[in-house]
Amino acid sequence: MRYKLIFFLFTLFSLNSYLCQENDNLILNPSFESIDGKLRKLNQINVANDWYSPTSLKADLFSSSVPGDIGTPENIYGKEFPKEGENYAGILAYSYNNNKPRTYLQSMLIKPLASGLNYCLNIHVSLSDLSKYAIDNIGVHISEEPVSLDKKGDIIFNDKAILSAVVTNEKSKIYKSRYKWETICGVYQADGKEKYITIGNFFNNKDTEYEKLIKSDDFPGIQLPEAYYYIDNVELVLVEDPDLCNCNKSQKKKRESIVYHLDVQVDEKLPIDVKLKKYSIYFDVESYTLDPMFDNNLNNVIEILKNNPELKLQLNGHIDNLEKQAINDDPENKILKNLGNYRSKLVKDFLLKNGISSDRITAEDLGSDQPASKGASMFSMAKNRRVEFIIIK
């Protein structure tokens, strides 16, 4: 009974800690997952609980539950996987010659901000595929009263004091990544009693830096003369020290890894295909660099090929599951997208440089579909980052 009580108390404490961490964020429904009503078309941000638009032209809500124009990951503006959950919002932040009115997101905070205290703001944005322009001035206005405009139009702050209080990222940064979430991050020092947050572009076009982009080949359709952004994971939390608002925390760090290697004494009596399997080449995380410790393996493969001139090999490049996830997170990263291919071609090039004819070697990318180990440990993952030698029959 005593053990059950301890387990119950531990579970209760863990749950309370989790809820407290969740409640640190002053934004309600931060990733637009909670919905009340039927989502059918564009301009329905109000269907997301606790979110609305301050102008008569409403922002958009996208969801995997509604395929088509307002679906995820594919929709009328492009393709993007939600940063979290199944939904995200969308706003028009810029149009050439102001041909189209901008849209904005607005929400009421869980509680008013306290005077003199610092708050860390993080918002994830991704430029849509069909946007012809990318801009810098996506920001957040935090205010005591809601911002409102009873017609379609742009909310422009001409007062420099108000503009200076808009939370933006580095002034020179233009948000131009498609298929990849970028972070708007900054510190806001409260005057006190602020309880509304508004997201959008509050600057004149002439004060907005932009970059004209070439259309992505990965999504069909005609480019639009505008900058349309998907928005997800809005966070506003109190920080004791402004330096604790680490605006680089979302930058991806390479995970710790090991390169699998097993020194084996290969019995010469073994069949050739078994020998070749033992001579597989392994790689570090998200890398296709050949480690010198595999020189013996490669030299043994070359010797087999020279002693068996009729032999032809297929080099199969493999990645691990976390590398596959990295590709999903950053589909425009050419190295990640072609990692299995780069690995197999690198080994092929080594063989060709050492006297093996190109008509005897083919290189293939098998992705993560044929793992050598199905475990999730660092050691298991290391076994899966490999190139295998397969005899073509």
Image (cartoon, rainbow, N blue to C red):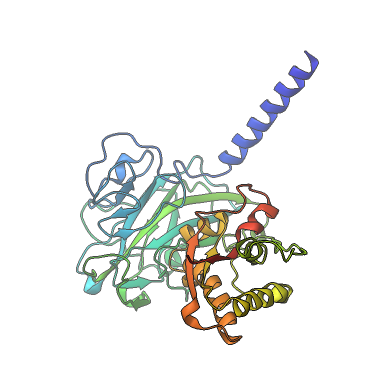
Residue 276 x, y percent position in the rendering: 63, 66
Q: Residue furthest top?
A: 1
Q: Residue furthest right?
A: 2
Which is more toward the observer, 342 or 4?
Answer: 342
> Is residue 145 rendered to the left or right of residue 361?
left
Is residue 101 in sight in this rendering? Answer: yes
- Place residue 9 in its image quadrant: top right
Q: Residue at x 46, y 41 (%)?
A: 28
> Is residue 217 rendered to the left or right of residue 167?
left
So how many labels did they put on this image?
A: 0
Residue 189 x, y percent position in the rendering: 57, 57
> Is residue 249 rendered to the left or right of residue 161?
right
- Place residue 74 in its image quadrant: bottom left
- Place residue 311 in its image quadrant: bottom right
Vertical placement of residue 225 versus 385, above or below: below
Is residue 169 in sight in this rendering? Answer: no
Residue 340 x, y percent position in the rendering: 52, 66
State which quarter of the image contains the N terminus.
Answer: top right
> Is residue 156 rendered to the left or right of residue 319?
left
Residue 157 x, y percent position in the rendering: 36, 65
Which is more toward the observer, 85 or 173?
Answer: 85
Which is more toward the observer, 84 or 17?
Answer: 84
Vertical placement of residue 177 versus 2, above or below: below
